[in-house]
Structures are given as C-alpha cells and as structure tokens.
Image (cartoon, rainbow, N blue to C red):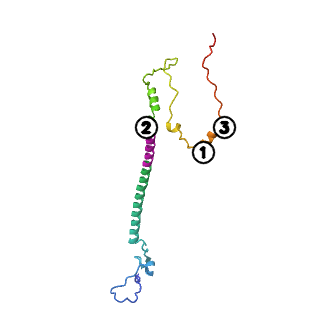
C-alpha cells in the first residue's frame, strides 16, 4: 500500500525582511484542526490536538496559588492577633475593676469609724473601755450583727438649695411657730411599794 503524502499547509507570500520558513501562530486555523498523518497500517489517523495549557497559564496558576497561601497565612496571623488583643483588653478590664475595689477599700480605711470597727472585731478596745464578750448557752461568743457599709453609698451628696427657699421657710416658720414639747418629768414615781 502506498502511503499517502503528508499534507502541508500552503504557504502564502513571505513578508519582506524575513528569511527562513514562515512560522504559523497557534491561533491559525491549522492549529485548531487535527493533523492527518499516515498510520502504520496504511490508513490516515487523526493526531490528538495539543492541550491549551501553556507555560504562561502554569506560571499564572502558581503565582495565584502563592498569593492565596500568603494571604491565608497573613489572615491567620491577623485573626490570632485580634484574639490576643481581645484577651488583653479583658485582662485590663479585670485589673481596672480590681484597682477600683482596692481604692475604695483604701478610702474605707481612711475613715476613723471603719478603723475602730475593724479593731473591735479583733477584740481591741479604746483606752479606758472594758471589753465584754457575750456568750451563748454553749459558752461560745456570739457574732456581732452590726456592720459598717461603704461611706460612698451611705453619704449621699447634699443637693444645694436656692437661697429664696430658705428665706421663705423662715417666713412660714415665723407665721406658724411649732408647738413646744412637754417638759420631761424631773422626778420618777415609785412603782410598786
């Protein structure tokens, strides 16, 4: 069997200034069509066409992969730093609350009544006083029921009053004086002789 001759694309006129065979671009019609070559059995066989993946596409995919990896690692670092900042802000808030508690405790210790109350809880007495301990039926000391509260919560700031309201109250008091209280008894009657 005679082999069929190989088809070659027809060549047109060569552009000026070029020497050598003309190169066909990958976008020409011959690149899109499969080449027909002689098969070993004598028939014509179609050659599979080349993949469209080029070197530029591979480089582009690699660059995009590298950018994605670097972006993902940067995003991970950013999220870790944000979590760390949030933890630090929580710690700062707790420490500020503790500082305010300690400052309030310091103000309480500057109050002489609070210092005396704390000393009395430790069974200290002022000079000239006698200490008494109340015992229950088992012989154990009873706990004190009284406690002191924070001076900031007890002593409310007094609201200033206008001068004319004080003057008007004195005018009302002059027109309606209060009734005098009965005098206390000077002698006690003996009960049950």
Q: CA distance from mark 3 to mark 1?
A: 17 Å
- 102 in magenta: yes
* Segment tinted magenta in the rendering: 88-106
Q: Earlier in the sequence, mark 3 or mark 1?
A: 1
Question: Disc 1 marks which residue?
Answer: 164
Q: Earlier in the sequence, mark 2 or mark 1?
A: 2
Residue 23 in the image: above or below residue 179: below
Answer with left or right where residue 85 lies relative to residue 189: left
Question: Disc 2 marks which residue?
Answer: 106
Residue 180 in the image: state x and y as whole percent.
64, 29
Query: Would you say the residues marked 2 and 1 are in contact, meaning their CB atoms lie under 8 Å apart?
Result: no
What secondary structure do most residues of the magenta stretch adopt? helix
**Label 3 CA crowd tier, 10 Å (few <14, some 14–19, many 20+):** few
Residue 30 in the image: state x and y as whole percent.
43, 81
Query: Would you say the residues marked 2 and 3 are in contact, meaning their CB atoms lie under 8 Å apart?
Result: no
Q: Nearer the viewer, residue 110 or 34?
A: 110
Residue placed farthest to the left in the image?
19
Give the residue drawn at x 65%, y 39%: 172
Residue 157 in the image: state x and y as whole percent.
53, 41
């Amino acid at each position: 069997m005679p082999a069929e001759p190989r088809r070659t694309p027809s060549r047109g006129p060569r552009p000026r200034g070029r020497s050598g065979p003309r190169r066909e671009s990958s976008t020409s019609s011959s690149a899109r069509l499969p080449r027909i070559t002689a098969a070993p059995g004598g028939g014509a066989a179609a050659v599979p066409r080349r993949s469209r993946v080029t070197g530029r596409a591979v480089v582009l995919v690699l660059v995009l992969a590298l950018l994605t990896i670097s972006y993902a690692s940067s995003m991970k670092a950013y999220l870790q730093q944000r979590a760390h900042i949030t933890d630090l802000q929580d710690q700062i808030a707790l420490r500020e609350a503790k500082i305010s508690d300690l400052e309030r405790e310091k103000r309480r210790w500057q109050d002489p009544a609070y210092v005396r109350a704390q000393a009395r809880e430790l069974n200290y007495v002022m000079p000239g006083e006698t200490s008494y301990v109340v015992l229950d039926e088992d012989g154990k000391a009873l706990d004190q029921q009284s406690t002191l509260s924070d001076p900031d919560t007890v002593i409310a700031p007094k609201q200033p009053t206008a001068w004319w309201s004080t003057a008007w109250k004195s005018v009302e008091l002059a027109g309606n004086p209060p009734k005098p209280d009965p005098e206390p008894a000077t002698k006690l009657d003996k009960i049950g002789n």
